[in-house]
Structure formats: structure tokens, C-alpha cells
Image (cartoon, grey):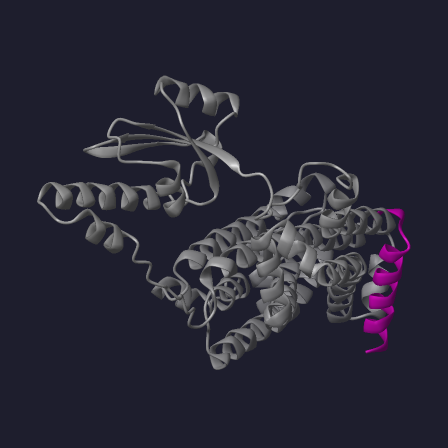
Amino acid sequence: MRNFFNVLKFEYTGMVRGKGFLITVALFMSLLLVVASLPMILGFFNRGGDEEIYYDATGEQAVGVFYDTTGWYTPEIIASFSPHFDWTPIDRPDAIERGLETGDFAIGLRLAADGITVYIPGSDWMGAGNFMFYEMARAMAQAQALEQAGVDAAVIETALATDPTMDVVVVGRDGGQSYFVAMAFTILLMLMVSMYGAIVSHSVSTEKTSKAIELLTISTSSNSLIFGKVIGVGLVALTQFGIALIPGVLVMYFNLERWHEFAPMVGGIMEMIFASNILGMAFLFFLLAFFTYAFLFAALSSTVSRAEDLSSSQSIPTVLLMAAYFVSFSALFAPDAFHAQVLSYVPFFSPLVMMARATMTEVPVLEIALSAGVSLLYVLLLGFLSAKIFRIGIMLTGNRPNLRQIFKLMRQA
């Protein structure tokens, strides 16, 4: 145990004192602080200006234009269906596309008795809220049909003025906001595991080619060496991102109200993160994913005798990590699908897939605990397996063994 702590301390202090560690922390912290303070920064530069940086109900509205061939529509009627634009009639339909291309108009409508054509800029490719114009055209067509059938105009106007209320109750976790949270966490987790897994791989291969490795393996067990290295790098990762993340998260938390004004969607997502257990789950599954792949990186890099072969030894864990990444993305759209549920307990897939599922929907605590327990079990198995492969790899220095030779020597040992 003493040798384990000596290796861990040596690995941790050696990386923390390096210039690369300090530079990465400084850059990452600066970037996060700038992003977290974005509403304040933009508000400061915009102070005293006429234009609002973020949307305000009392501010200037975007211009919407319409060309009416029916005589049914007025700006007030269209605004009752779509109040977020300043509606203006135009006399020429060809001016709609030109105005959208130049940015003079935000949206355009061409209104006819048999339907409606909506013109939107290419940047609004999702076309959010366009169904409102369909409802408007249908209501006006129905009103004209009723008037032609002899129904009193006052009755039609009263019917069209009916404004029922609608409340939306989200039962369980809000999948709309959770999607972006899960996507961000999945991408960040994959990048961190990939980056620090490569650091483990480089550290193990460098240690193997060291002249003092024979003496080191005699005085220290391979278990202490591998576990000390991997856990040391893991602590470096937590230290690096903890120092960088905590100030940024605190700044964003204290600026939460400004974020609601600046970007309501981002503010809602951040509020959901702070009010839920997502951060705790992200931390748990990051540790499980990191140690799973770190031990795999360590095992395969210990079979390398030359620095030129190191990249090829990283191909298997990289392919597995990318496969888990794509499967976890599919779990964002179907968190309760059969393949997502099964892969929540499969080695190399479970941390990312369960993280995606638990963020998108309410997964029972028992299933999360079971997935974490299974992941922890094969992390330990991978750790001891990588230690054995490391010891065998030292004996085969100068030759790159294949998997068959490795397992043969492990059986003999």
C-alpha cells in the first residue's frame, strides 16, 4: 500500500507542477469565466446604447410583412396570432424575398383565399411557430365561409375572439431542456476520457522504456504501479477541471437571473442543473468512464516497445469510446429503448449510456445503482488485468506481443 501511495504521489505531483497543467487550467478557467459572465459583459458594452442586447418585450420588434390578395387581413388580425413581429402590409409580393435576403424583414406572408405561403430566412430553418399562421388562415377561411352562408358577422367575430387557456404540465424530467444538458455532458465526458486516457497511455509506455523499470518492478508490485498511475492521472483531471469549473459555475449561478434575461433557454437549463442531481450523476459516471478506459489504455500501451507504436495501441479504446458515444446519443432520443437499457450494464458502454438515460428521463435509483455497481466491478477487473499485462509487457521488451502471447503468458503466470 505504501508503494501505491508513493507512485500516486509521484504521478500526481509531477503532472500538477508542470507548465502544461497550469496553462490548461488558466486558459480553461478564463474561457469559462468569460462565458459565465457574458450577460454582464454584453450589458456593460451596451450600456447607454439604443439597442437591447437581449429580447425585451418593450423593445423594438422584428419586422414582419404580408401581401394580402383576399382583403381579409389587417396587421391587428395577424398580430393576434403572432405578436412577436411588427406586421406591415406590402403591395408587391416579390419584395418579400428581397427583404429577407437583405435582412430588412424577419418573416413574410403571402395570403390567398385557398392558403398561405410563409417566407422565412435560412437561419430560421426550424421554422418555430409557423403552425400559428396555418391556424390563422384556417380561421379566416372558416369565417368567410360562415359569412357567405349568412351567419351574422358579430357572431363570427365573437367566435373568433374566443381565447381558451392552455397549461402544459411536464410530468417527470423535462426532455426538451434535458436533451441539451445530456448532449453537453456526453461530449464533455467523452473528450475528458479520451484526453486523459491518452495521458495514461503515454505515461505507461514512457515508464516501460525507462532504464529503472526493472528495479522498480522488483521493489513495487505491478498493481501498485498501474493503480497508482491511473488514479494519479484521474486526480490530476479532477484537480484541473475542478479549479477551472468551480469559479465558472459559481459566476453562472450568481448571474442566473441575468441569464434568464439574456438567453431564457440557457437560464432554464442552468436552473434545472442546479436544482437537480445531474451534477452528482455526471461526476459519478465520469469517474467510472474514466477509470474503465484508463485501465484499458494502460493495458494496451504496456505492450508497446516503441513510441511509434503507441498510437496503434490506442485505436481499440478509441473505437470503443466512439461506439459508446454514438450509442449514448441514440439514447438521448430513445432513453427507454431496449438497446439503451441493455447497454446500460455492458462494459465500456454503461457509464455514457446510463448518463444519457438518467439525464433525459427518470431512471429508477436501483437501476442507476446497479449500473454503477457493475461498472465499478469491471473497473477493478480491468485494473488487475492491466497490471498483469503490464508485467508481461516488461518481460517482452523489444518485441510487441499479440493478444494470444499475452494470454498464454498470463496462464503460465
| Residue under the image location 53 percent in, 54 percent down | 180
Q: Position of residue 261 (x, y in %)?
A: 64, 53
Quarter the N terminus occupies: bottom right
Front residue of 41/328: it is 41
Q: Position of residue 196 (x, y in %)?
A: 71, 54
Q: Quadrant of residue 234?
A: bottom right
Q: Is residue 54 left or right of residue 26?
A: left
Q: Is residue 23 left or right of residue 343?
A: right
Q: Position of residue 109 (x, y in %)?
A: 35, 31
Front residue of 385/275: it is 275
Q: Is residue 26 left or right of residue 401?
A: right
Whether the magenta-drawn stretch holds residue 263 is answered as no
Quarter the C terminus occupies: bottom right
| Residue under the image location 54 percent in, 39 percent down | 61
Residue 395 vs 305, above or below: the answer is below
Whether the magenta-drawn stretch holds residue 7 is answered as yes
Question: Magenta residues, as a range?
Answer: 1-20
| Residue under the image location 80 percent in, 54 percent down | 207
Q: Quadrant of residue 67?
A: top left
Residue 346 visible in this rendered orientation of the protein? yes
Q: Position of residue 112 (x, y in %)?
A: 24, 30
How many numbered callouts? 0
Q: Quadrant of residue 162?
A: bottom left
| Residue under the image location 48 percent in, 32 percent down | 106
Front residue of 263/202: it is 263
